[in-house]
């Protein structure tokens, strides 16, 4: 008996080690994604009616109940946004942003947003060194993301807070460079993205510390908002500001520029004194609203792209294009679906024979 125990004791001792081996996290099923999505929307509904605490509880339950679903990353972002913007709890917000920034999140757009706001949390907490590191990671890891503009913006603001004015100006001058050189020649803003305003006026060099410049933005859809611009450094001749845009019906003076496809945004700045000694001269700039069209074949939840279609099953198509969102109602768009297949050897031979004849 003792010899038996000695012989098999190493095997028995290794059993707990196998039990402790990490498990591969599987992707959630479509059913789980749908259930998580409904729960997420229930939290959104509670937030709309002012039940903030209940909304946070529901979003947290999405994370706890559906740990394999991709929807959990959206719940993390909603929790983080509320903690950052409303409660100002930067440490708790950062934890949720970090959870949404992991590689398991298949949406690079959401990952870039999460990374950016990790840096924002460090900035708001006054930890500018870590903020700079995160923002540079955003620039390097997501070179095609529009969040690069925001990353440069926070790098510039951080250097400004530290008194590094030359570095602040260098970073802030790069705001808006996320577009390609071809796109930068076309004055436009993508619907749903932040709209940046930069004004260059020598008169700004004599502004008192803490002074701000206000400009008005008016859309052809009827929205009108005020953008507050801050000076870039001491004795600077440049001020910068920003405002979010959203595809929605116009609601003036709510802090968000509601636009529709094809809208034009007119920016109005009052120049108190010009080089020609005129006073209160209006400076106008017009920008067109555009959208990048995207067509996808997805699963039934419209969350994940499908690499192939299954014969006999429904095909779920999704087209996103802000250019066709032109009314306050439900707009329609047409898309053409084409099916291609490889020709058989017999068909190829028949075509060759026909060409010879």
Image (cartoon, rainbow, N blue to C red):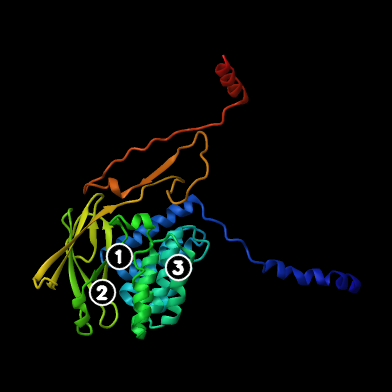
The total of numbered circles placed on residues is: 3
Asked if disc 1 and disc 2 are in contact, CB closer than 8 Å, the reply is no
Q: Secondary structure at mark 3?
A: helix
Please name the residue that numbered disc 3 is placed on: 138
The residue where tag 2 is placed is 238
Between disc 2 and disc 3, the foreground one is 2
The answer to whether residue 271 is left or right of residue 130 is left
Q: How many residues crowd mark 2 within 10 Å: few (<14), some (14–19), many (20+)? A: many
Q: Residue at x 60, y 26 (%)?
A: 344
Most distant residue in the top direction: 357
Crowdedness near tag 1: few (<14), some (14–19) or many (≥20) residues, C-alpha within 10 Å: some
The residues tagged by marks 1 and 2 sit, at their Cα atoms, a distance apart of 38 Å
For the residues labelled 3 and 1, the Cα–Cα distance comes to: 30 Å
Task: Single out the mark in the foreground, 3 or 1.
Answer: 3
* Left or right: residue 16 compared with residue 115: right
262 lies above or below 124: above
Q: Position of residue 174 (x, y in %)?
A: 36, 69
Dot 2 or dot 3, earlier in sequence = 3
Residue found 30% across the figure and 55% down from its top: 186
Disc 3: CA contacts within 10 A as few (<14), some (14-19) or many (>=20): many
Give residue 7's position: percent from left, percent from top: 87, 70
């Amino acid at each position: 008996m003792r010899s038996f125990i000695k012989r098999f004791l190493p095997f028995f001792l290794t059993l707990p080690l196998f039990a402790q081996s990490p498990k591969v996290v599987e992707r959630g099923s479509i059913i789980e994604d749908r259930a998580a999505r409904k729960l997420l929307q229930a939290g959104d509904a509670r937030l709309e009616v002012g039940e903030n605490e209940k909304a946070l509880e529901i979003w947290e339950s999405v994370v706890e109940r559906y740990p394999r679903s991709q929807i959990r990353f959206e719940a993390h972002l909603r929790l983080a946004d509320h903690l950052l913007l409303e409660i100002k709890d930067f440490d708790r917000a950062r934890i949720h942003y970090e959870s949404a920034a992991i590689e398991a999140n298949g949406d690079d757009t959401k990952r870039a947003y999460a990374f950016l706001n990790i840096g924002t949390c460090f900035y708001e907490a006054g930890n500018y060194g870590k903020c700079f590191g995160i923002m540079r990671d955003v620039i390097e890891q997501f070179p095609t993301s529009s969040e690069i503009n925001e990353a440069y913006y926070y790098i510039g603001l951080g250097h400004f807070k530290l008194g590094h004015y030359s570095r602040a100006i260098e970073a802030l001058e790069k705001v808006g460079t996320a577009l390609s050189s071809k796109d930068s020649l076309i004055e436009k803003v993508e619907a749903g993205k932040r709209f940046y305003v930069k004004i260059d006026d020598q008169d700004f060099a004599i502004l008192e510390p803490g002074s701000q410049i206000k400009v008005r933005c008016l859309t052809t859809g009827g929205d009108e908002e005020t953008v507050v611009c801050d000076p870039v450094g001491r004795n600077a001749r440049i001020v910068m500001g920003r405002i979010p845009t959203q595809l929605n019906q116009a609601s003036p003076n709510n802090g968000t520029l509601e636009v529709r496809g094809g809208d034009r945004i007119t920016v109005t700045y009052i120049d108190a004194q010009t080089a020609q000694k005129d006073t209160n001269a209006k400076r106008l700039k017009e920008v067109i609203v555009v959208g990048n069209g995207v067509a996808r074949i997805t699963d039934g939840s419209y969350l994940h792209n499908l690499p192939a279609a299954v014969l006999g099953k429904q095909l779920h198509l999704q087209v996103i294009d802000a250019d066709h969102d032109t009314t306050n109602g439900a707009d329609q768009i047409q898309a053409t679906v084409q099916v291609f297949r490889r020709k058989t050897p017999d068909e190829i031979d028949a075509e060759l024979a026909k060409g010879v004849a």
